[in-house]
Image (spheres, helix red, strand yellow):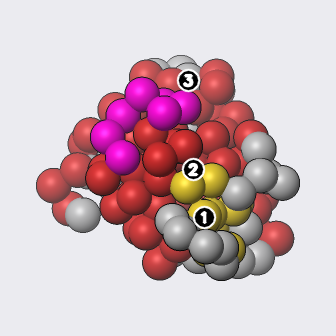
């Protein structure tokens, strides 16, 4: 892979350390793209055409990683994009950019490390 096409060290480290599936990344990027909206697992699953149960698990993982916050409401929990720090927000911006420009490289990185999560 040419040097200018490599994923940055920050993106590689974040994906290896924090992303366990393509679905989890898709959910994170969905919430990032809509930072002022709170999402339920049902809404995420409809938007991404996936399993509600799986979306709920991925949202819980993102919450534990301090990438989203849970907003209290009646009924189903709701989540909003809320990285714990500006540095983390910057890393997530770089991840989103890398995924937009080189999705296959990011997906390959996720699958190459899938056994370590």
* Mark 2 Cα shell of 10 Å, populated few (<14), some (14-19), many (≥20): many
Residue 51 colored magenta? yes
Q: Which residues are magenta?
A: 46-52
Name the mark on residue 102: 3
Q: Residue at point 53% right, 69% down? A: 75
* Mark 1 Cα shell of 10 Å, populated few (<14), some (14-19), many (≥20): many
Query: Which residue is more in the foreground, 1 or 18?
Result: 18
Q: Residue at point 62% right, 43% down? A: 29
Residue 75 in the image: above or below residue 35: below
Residue 69 in the image: above or below residue 53: below
Marks 3/1: CA–CA distance: 30 Å
Tell me residue 92's x, y (percent). 67, 53
Tell me residue 11's x, y (percent). 57, 50
Mark 3 secondary-structure assignment: loop
Residue 63 colored magenta? no
Residue 54 in the image: above or below residue 17: above
Residue tagged by mark 1? 78
Of all residues, the one furthest to the front in this rendering is: 74
Mark 2 secondary-structure assignment: helix
Query: Which residue is more in the foreground, 62 or 102?
Result: 62
Q: Residue at point 63% right, 53% down? A: 39
Tell me residue 9's x, y (percent). 56, 53
Residue tagged by mark 2? 28
């Amino acid at each position: 892979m040419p040097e200018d096409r490599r994923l940055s060290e920050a993106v590689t480290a974040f994906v290896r350390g924090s992303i366990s599936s393509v679905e989890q990344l898709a959910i994170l990027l969905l919430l990032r793209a809509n930072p002022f909206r709170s999402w339920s697992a049902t809404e995420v699953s409809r938007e991404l055409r996936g399993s509600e149960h799986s979306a709920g698990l991925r949202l819980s993982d993102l919450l534990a990683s301090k990438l989203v916050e849970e907003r209290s409401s009646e009924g189903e929990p709701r989540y909003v994009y809320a990285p714990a720090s500006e540095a983390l927000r910057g890393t997530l911006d770089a991840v989103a950019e890398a995924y937009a420009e080189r999705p296959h490289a990011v997906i390959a990185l996720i699958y190459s490390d899938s056994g370590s999560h």
